[in-house]
Image (spheres, helix red, strand yellow):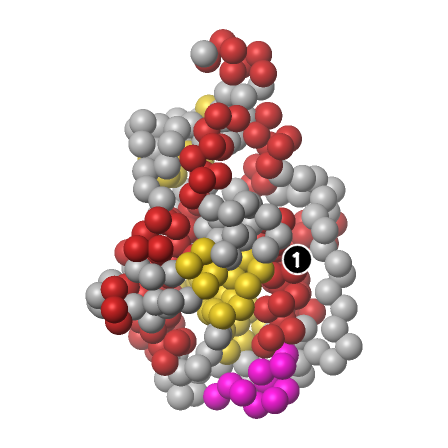
Amino acid sequence: MNIFKNLLGAAPKLLSDGSFSPSPLALKLATSPKTDFDGAIYESPYKGGKHRVLMVCTEEKNMTMANGKTFSTGNHPVEIGLPMLHLLKAGFDIDIVTPTGKPVKIEMWAMPEKDEAVKKLYLNFKEKFENPGSLADVVKNSLNDDSPYISAFIPGGHGVMLGLPESLDLNKLLNWVHQTNRYTLAICHGPAALLAASLDSDKDSFIYRDYTIAAFPDSVDKQTPMIGYMPGQMPWLFGERLQELGINIINKKADATCHIDRKLITGASPKAANAFGRLAADTLLDAVNSEKVV
């Protein structure tokens, strides 16, 4: 089987630290050198300066699969990049944090190398990705009436499933955002982090119970090892756990689906990143212009 996969280019690539990145076949099928970024033109961007977006990223890289092999992951660059471009063009500054302030881990193998807008964004924010703030510090010092944050944004990538769903600090952030009528943004595997909101509650009191979202389908995660995207089956399935808590996932494919339910905005996959970014930016602009936020 391994010889056959090597011939097809479907064998995951072994990295120097013993983890695996996607196979050449998987990269060809599941990534693109250029995105569908639409330029993010906003006729009336926000100019108030008060409201900011807090982007919560993963600081963990290696996911141990069901077979014991490790997948080299992190946050997906398109799912960070396109929403950031829209939010920035719409006039919102973005603060970047990881749980403890360690560098953001990014799936660089998915970087769209022919997309100048995304590459320029990463160059401009390189220092902040390498030296982010600490979510723990934000929770300790900034969840109050004077907080500048209009929204919490959780970009996707399998790395979101490492640490964030068990984070008590993220639990506090998500519950605070929900209770103070702010917005939560999550794309692809980003909704896995919503599990953190259940750490101190039961199913009936889960703040997202009966919500409908778009997210990366468990069924696709089960299939991707066949093309060498990952070196084995997932250790657990986040969609399954969200559904057990009463969340309905609207999409069946890893497509461009985006959805808004109350103040939770979600997107299904990297294919949704541009539309998700625009939906998020338009929604936040409408909120500040109509004074629907604190």
Q: Is residue 232 left or right of residue 31?
A: left
Relative to 227, say whether 166 is above or below: below
Q: Is residue 95 left or right of residue 63?
A: right
Viewer-proximal residue, 14 or 212? 212
Find the magenta span and give its range.
285-294
Amino acid type, label 1: Asn
| Residue 137 rendering spot, x and y as whole percentages | 35, 70
Q: Nearer the viewer, residue 164 or 102?
A: 164
How many marks overall?
1
Residue pictured at 35% horizontal, 28% vertical: 69
Is residue 288 within the magenta segment?
yes
* Kind of element beneath mark 1: helix
Residue picked out by circle 1: 274
Is residue 158 toward the left or the right of residue 27 in the image? left
The residue at the point 38 percent across, 67 percent down is 210
Quick check: 136 above or below 271? below
Q: Residues within 10 Å of mark 1 (few under 14, many from 20)?
A: many
Q: Quadrant of residue 27?
A: top right
Residue 22 in picture, x, y percent from top left: 52, 30
- Measured as percent of width and height from the top left, residue 259 is found at 55, 63
Confirm whether residue 56 shows in the render.
Answer: yes
The N terminus lies in quadrant: top left
| Residue 113 visible in image | no
Q: Residue at x 33, y 61 (%)?
A: 246
The reply, left or right, for residue 285 in relation to residue 220 is right
Tell me which corner region of the image, top left, top right, bottom left or bottom right, holds residue 40. bottom right
Q: Is residue 273 magenta?
A: no
Residue 87 in the image: above or below residue 116: below
Q: Position of residue 280 (x, y in %)?
A: 59, 69
